[in-house]
Image (tube, rainbow, N blue to C red):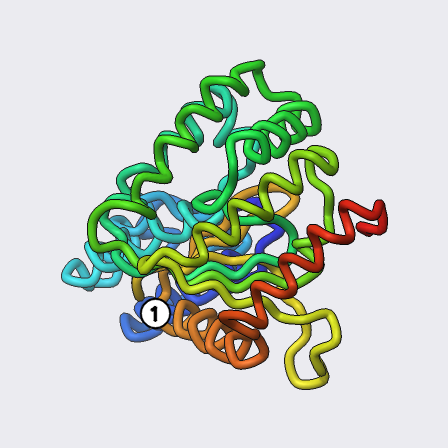
Amino acid sequence: MASPSSSARQALEALGSRLREIRLDARLSGRGLGERTGWHSSKVSKIEYGRQTPTADDIRAWCQACDAVDRADELVASVHAVKGMFVEWRRMERAGLRPAQESVLPLWERTKRFRIYSSWLIPGPLQTRAYITAVLSAIAARRDVSNDVSAAVDVRVAKQHVVYAGDHRFAVLLEESVLRYPIGGPDTMAGQLGHLLTVASLPSVSLGIIPLGADRSALWPVEGFWLFDDDRATVELVSGHLTITQPHEVAMYAGTFADLAEQAVYGPTARALITGAVAALDSGQSS
């Protein structure tokens, strides 16, 4: 599987290690497994070292040859998880931005606890329509996506009902620099910052801001990520979208979120940072 994601690569290598253990437990060499399955031994080696993603049929043939049929279903589920970890934007958005926005609706609906850390942008649930339009217009231009920005904006705005209805809870952490990037221009950003002050007062939202002057010696800014309950983490990369479901990796992101949360300020102090960013816009000093 071609992917810039180290997590996806490591997951594929871990799967290969499990398959190698099954082969060794069966006392088969790579050549011997190849003879039983009708494969060249190089295919066995590539799968075991994570250089080739096995298909579900490959997994079942492997387990059959090693008298480990009872392991097949578990391993097939693992390979499906690996394949779904990294999706290139061009694949996710090949039908346009609107379908990409709609694809996450079921996940948003069923998630009760959102934890979101952003070092780049105000996150989607807290965005204004004008800010969303600026963000999606830039994405469409940069990634040469079909021109359905208006429809995609409507979908993203509609998705925000989860902030106001139901028992969803949002813990959001922002780097202060996010407040200073005038996405869409000063007027759009001023409206966005005002909206941020409003949604931060909702009972469903906890907003923390990590000040520019915070001591980051122990933990510096990292890639933005979302945690959906305790089930998965997602990360947006330059080239694609990464979904992490391995429990130990999800726990790493949860631990990082907790550590970042300790560096953040809340309540009146956070509001003061937002109003300071608004004042900087008014004076033309926003970075």
Looking at this view, name the residue that lies furthest to the top: 147
Q: Eyeballing the image, is 220 above or below 75?
A: below
Identify the image quadrant of residue 118: bottom right
Residue 66 x, y percent position in the rendering: 25, 62
Residue 108 seen in the current view: yes
Left or right: residue 96 compared with residue 28: right
Identify the image quadrant of residue 240: top right
Pointer 1: what residue? 247
Identify the image quadrant of residue 142: top right
Specify few, some or many for label 1: CA neighbours under 10 Å numbering under 14, 14-19, or 20 or more: few
Residue 47 x, y percent position in the rendering: 46, 55
Where disc 1 sits, the SS reads helix
Q: Disc 1 residue type?
A: Pro
> Total number of numbered labels?
1
Q: Residue at x 47, y 59 (%)?
A: 116
Looking at this view, name the residue that lies furthest to the left: 70
Q: Residue at x 74, y 53 (%)?
A: 279
Left or right: residue 211 compared with residue 16: right
Q: Eyeballing the image, is 150 above or below 5?
A: above
Residue 51 x, y percent position in the rendering: 55, 53
| Most foreground residue, 76 or 57 | 76
| Most foreground residue, 241 or 112 | 112
Q: Residue at x 66, y 85 (%)?
A: 218
Residue 31 seen in the current view: no
Residue 36 x, y percent position in the rendering: 31, 52
Left or right: residue 35 compared with residue 238: left
Looking at this view, name the residue that lies furthest to the bottom: 218
| Most foreground residue, 70 or 128 | 128
